[in-house]
Image: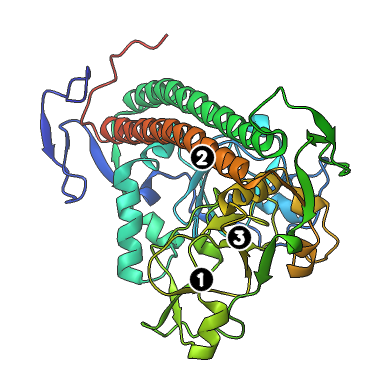
Amino acid sequence: MMGNYQGYQKYKDSGVEWLGDIPEHWEVKRFKFLLSEPFKYGANEAAEIDDPNLPRYIRITDVKDDGNLRDDTFRSLPEEIAKDYILEESDILLARSGATVGKTFIYRKSWGKAAYAGYLIRARVSGQNNSDFIYKFLQSKLYWDWVKSIFIQATIQNISAEKYSNLFITIPPLNEQEKIAQFLDYKTKQIDELIKKKETLIEKLDEKRTALISHAVTKGLNSSVPMKDSGIEWLGNIPEHWDVRHVKRVADISYGVGGEIDRSLTEGINLLSLPNVTRDGNLLVDEYGFCELSDFEKVGLILQKGDLLFNWRNGSSSHLGKTAYFDLDGEWTNVSFLLRIRFNMSQFCSRYFQYMLNGLRITGFFMVSKAGVNNTFNLNELSNLKIICPVHSEQKQIAEYLDQKTTQIDIQKAKIKQAIELLKEYRTSLITNAVTGKIDVSQVDIP
């Protein structure tokens, strides 16, 4: 029993260990026996055409988590190539390799005429079975456990049509398949709407966080102080007693360890690289590398608490310019793709400047305003960046204020994310229990 849902009166052994018991009147069949024709691989064609008058060319990367198609990745195929791969209503597509292997998609005619790519396998369910029910089974935890077991056996992330053919699926009578699919459509839509509302809350909290940081580091905490023109077009007015300086006038900037990194090292100086700096500007050190440095090299390359690490080379607006505050114990250094920014801590508060740089990153400043090329913002460009400098005591005050406020927002976000994960777990559990007969939803009224 699950919540308010009861189980069936009688069960039997399914004959498949990982499926367990099923309702007495259900069957278990291999996937290939549920189809009107054999599994079929898609077209091995490049996705080069973008013509809405031609059949859409569906790849697994076009499929969103909610099962709909992305608008921003639209590609099409010429009619003569697409004709052998045209989809019909309720055809199911299964990813057969790569990072998305096992992911599924059910096609609707309302999306327009479409064909599918070679990394996908088409399953066309026969009229004796319900495609929506089969599709829901392919979203269950038992299905994903089966997918993982295939990887363990084969040691590569690939599921062929032959392997999919032999997947065991629980099969109720057709009318019951339809009722279960309708029930799950209704309930999962409710859950997905709740998840979407919570994700919107997170977006609003992120916007609030960004606005909070931007205002504090550019206008200060006292709204009554006189203002002046900063002389910087994108910045506007700043408090009258603040200065505008180039970064090179207030900090020492340097590249990290250059050359090829020896990934085989298991000891030495702890080495931070791009993945260790999160989008939020935190340091993540679950995994890190090592390097060897001479005593002479250590003088210029060992990090000190209060240093900032600036990601100057990453080709997207969400990562270029992400800046972390270093406060770890032990001997650490950084790769050359991270710039080390070091302030005189008696005159400047590096936490304040970390907030400022991350605030600029969030707005996409480093992507649109830099003088460099190849999606970088290098040492020379950062050195000549103009930044705002309140007095030292005010820098500390702003940093402490933002520490407190952003921590409160982060706690709120963490709670919402936890709620989203619980909803996702409930969604998967509900699907799994319904499609395997652990609960009987066939008599549940659906508005």
Residue where numbered disc 2 is placed: 400
Q: Do the CB atoms of the residues marked 2 and 1 lie less than 8 Å apart? A: no
Name the mark nearer the viewer: 2 or 1. 2
Residue at 65% over, 74% down: 255
- In front: 252, or 215? 252
Quadrant for the N terminus in the image: top left
Q: Total label count?
A: 3
Q: Is residue 184 above or below residue 69?
A: above
Q: Amino acid at mark 2?
A: Glu
Helix, strand or loop status at disc 1: loop
- In front: 33, or 352? 352
Q: In the image, 416: left or right of 260?
A: left
For marks 2 and 1, the one nearer the N-term is 1
Q: Amino acid at mark 1?
A: Leu
Q: What coloring was used for the rendering?
A: rainbow
Q: Is residue 135 above or below residue 345?
A: above
Helix, strand or loop status at disc 2: helix
Q: Amino acid at mark 3?
A: Gly
How far separated are the C-alphas under marks 2 and 1? Answer: 23 Å
Q: In the image, 150: left or right of 160?
A: left
How far separated are the C-alphas under marks 1 and 3? Answer: 49 Å
For marks 3 and 2, the one nearer the N-term is 3
Residue where numbered disc 3 is placed: 118
Residue 195 point in image, percent of width and height:
46, 28
Residue 46 point in image, percent of width and height:
73, 62
Residue where numbered disc 1 is placed: 303
Q: Which mark is residue 121?
A: none
The residue carrying pointer 1 sits among few (fewer than 14), some (14 to 19) or many (20 or more) residues within 10 Å by Cα, namely many
